[in-house]
Amino acid sequence: MEPPARLDTESIRDEKVKALKSIPPLETKNLVRGQFRDYLKEKGVAQNSQVETFAALKLEIDSWRWRGVPFYIRAGKCLPTTVTEVLVRLRRPPTMFQRDDLQSNYFRFRISPDNSIAFGLNFALPGDDTVGFSTEITGCQAPAPDNMNAYERVLGDAMAGDPSLFAREDYVEEAWRIVDPALKASTPVFQYEQKTWGPAEVENIVSPPGGWVNSVVSHTEDTVHQ
């Protein structure tokens, strides 16, 4: 979303709706739906249910700022870990040395379970100006004991009468406009094992340049390994 003209609730929500209005409808070729194995055995689930427990998709934002920049989203249940983060992969830098295999620099920030910011950068090996390697520089802050989790924040805002974080009706309508055509097209639902990163079909159908980054949460150090 673009910066709102004012910081009142409706101005913020207006910009959120504008962002969704810039997203064309999701195409079936840019969507993979999955269902973890044994989901149909869960209590209350219909035996022929096609409800997905996993989705990977590619979206475009048709605006002056984001045109030509693909957005890849992956979310699901029963994955190896629960984490919310965004990774921004930059364009691969040019090199004047043929031996270099420079990777794309990236910026990653995590919202939960901890708060962290990381930069993936290319460096030259010490003493050799023509050989490079990639590394990540990370700054991490573990949640303080008095920090509110997401549900506490939303419930607190609801009791305070602040609807900034809640979806307005036109926001919901735009969100459905984006995904409804692909859902009505009866796209297949692929099976995946619990504690994996979704169906194997994801890698061949919806995969960002450079592949997905599978995050691992270390409960002892609160760091990410890639």
Image (spheres, rainbow, N blue to C red):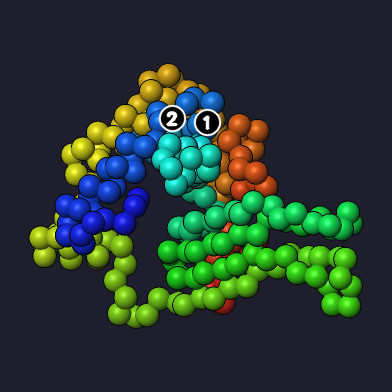
From the image, which quarter does the C terminus lie in? bottom right
Residue type, mark 1 in image: Asn
Q: Quadrant of residue 215?
A: bottom right
Separation (CA) of disc 2 from disc 1: 7 Å
Disc ID at residue 26: 2
Identify which residue, 62 or 40, lies in the foreground: 62
Residue 47 can be seen, yes or no? no
Residue 30 numbered tag: 1
> Can residue 22 be seen here?
yes
Please tell me which residue lies in front, 90 or 6.
6
Q: Secondary structure at mark 1?
A: helix
| Residue 217 point in image, percent of width and height | 55, 65
Where is residue 110 shown, x and y percent of the image?
48, 64
Residue type (three-letter) at the residue carrying disc 2 = Leu
The answer to which of 198 and 103 lies nearer the viewer is: 103
In-image side of 131 versus 153 (left or right): right
- Residue drawn at 25 percent across, 65 percent down: 153
Dot 2 falls on a residue whose secondary structure is loop
Q: Within the image, what quadrant is residue 172 found in? A: top left
